[in-house]
Image (cartoon, rainbow, N blue to C red):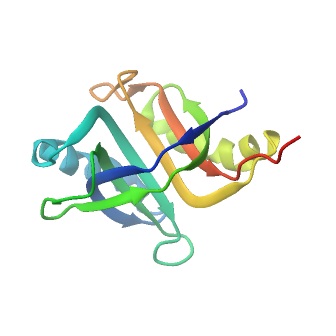
Amino acid sequence: MPPRLVERPAIHLVGVRHVFTPATMAEIPALWGRFVPRLDEIEDQTCDVTYGVCQEAVNGPGTFAYTAAVEVDAPGEVPDGMVGFTIPAGTWAVFTHEGHISKISETFDAISKTGLSAAALERAANVDLEVYDDRFDPATGMGAVDIYVSVRPPAPA
């Protein structure tokens, strides 16, 4: 299924971040395990949606920072051991992962290998957002997760 294109305003996030490699990415669920119990420490949350933010090549090729986060009204006080940051406004291609969360890397692979090129889209930045809303059940790991990929706006026809 082709992605839908959306324009998103800038968003401010606060969460727990760690740098991973392909060999250590199986540790991402443990990061969520450290983050979720601390949700109440984050002030001025805007909604019940959580985000997984992937930023590639942060410590060189083959590395990526992954942040389990929530949206806040504005950058402000950040609890110890967490980070606060802003994702700039932009154009995003939205793909939806269906099924168990353990298979989300397969969806990312499909996006990278064929999803963007089939839609004639190019990445604009090295950031992706996993958006966990009420369609996802964290207790079972099942449900829909939207994957937002930063893309260049399509050229006018």
Q: Quadrant of residue 15?
A: bottom left
Residue 106 visible in the current orientation: no
Residue 157 visible in the current orientation: yes
Q: Which is nearer the eye, 61 or 72?
A: 72
Left or right? Give the position of 14 relative to 23.
left
Looking at the image, residue 12 lies above or below residue 101: below
Q: Quadrant of residue 44?
A: top left
Q: How many marks?
A: 0
- Locate residue 139, reporting x and y percent: 27, 26
Q: Quadrant of residue 78?
A: bottom left
- Locate residue 135, reporting x and y percent: 40, 21
- Locate residue 64, reporting x and y percent: 47, 65
- Locate residue 154, reporting x and y percent: 77, 46
Residue at 38% of width from left, 67% of height from top? 19
Left or right? Give the position of 67 relative to 5.
left
Residue at 65% of width from left, 58% of height from top? 124
Looking at the image, residue 19 lies above or below residue 97: below
Q: Quadrant of the N terminus?
A: top right
Residue at 68% of width from left, 50% of height from top? 112
Looking at the image, residue 47 lies above or below residue 123: above
Left or right? Give the position of 100 relative to 73.
right
Q: Quadrant of the C terminus?
A: top right
Q: Which is nearer the eye, 155 or 36?
A: 155
Left or right? Give the position of 42 relative to 89.
left
Q: Which is nearer the eye, 86 or 105?
A: 86
Looking at the image, residue 44 lies above or below residue 18: above
| Residue, far right | 157
